[in-house]
Amino acid sequence: MNATIEHALADLKDLLGKGQFLEAMDKYLDDDVVLQEANNTPKEGKEVCIIAEKELLETVTEFIRYDINNIAIAGDVSYYEAVMEFKTNDGQHHRFEQVNRTQWKDGKIINERYYHA
């Protein structure tokens, strides 16, 4: 199982590093995925998550980076630290540092939560 997750994370690191968020979501989200940003209400279902991401990406005027570091895998769960930076159409520069906790099943993400300040 860890080899499958390691391969998926390497691919995700490449896709996200290029700002290819929708491609990564389409490839790796399970149809019944649950994604939760910090303490916000979880989003349920691949289609709902992709629609929300598209809405966010429509505001992005410049993608700067998405770096993944310090990957750890335990059973069917992976963790990593990420730094994401981008600019939006309101002139704001956003920088997020977060830890992602991801649960996998058959090479797909079934549950993911982002912890950040």
Image (cartoon, rainbow, N blue to C red):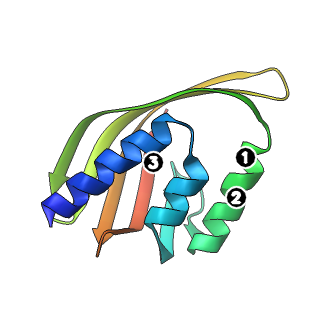
The reply to whether discs 2 and 1 touch (Cβ–Cβ < 8 Å) is yes
Q: Which residue is mark 1?
A: 56
Residue lying farthest right? 90
Quadrant hosting residue 45: bottom right
Count neighbours of disc 2 (C-alpha within 10 A) and say few if under 14, some if 14 to 19, many if 20 or more. Answer: few
Which residue is the site of mark 3?
Answer: 114
Query: Which class describes the residues within 10 Å of circle 1: few (<14), some (14-19), or many (20+)?
Result: few
The quarter holding residue 86 reads: top right
Mark positioned earlier in the residue sequence (3 or 1): 1
Q: Position of residue 71 (x, y in %)?
A: 23, 41
> Image check: 80 left or right of 27?
left
Mark 3 nearby-residue class (10 Å; few <14, some 14–19, many ≥20): many
Q: Which numbered dot is residue 52?
A: 2
Q: CA distance from mark 3 to mark 1?
A: 16 Å
Q: Secondary structure at mark 1?
A: helix
In this view, 58 is above or below 96: below
Amino acid on which the number 2 mark rests in the picture: Ala
Task: Check disc 2 and report its element: helix, strand or loop.
Answer: helix
Under mark 1, the amino acid is Leu
- What's the amino acid at mark 3? Tyr
Q: Name the residue located 40 percent from the left edge and 40 percent from the top edge.
A: 14
In primary-sequence order, the first of circles 3 and 2 is 2
Give the Cα distance between marks 3 and 2. 15 Å
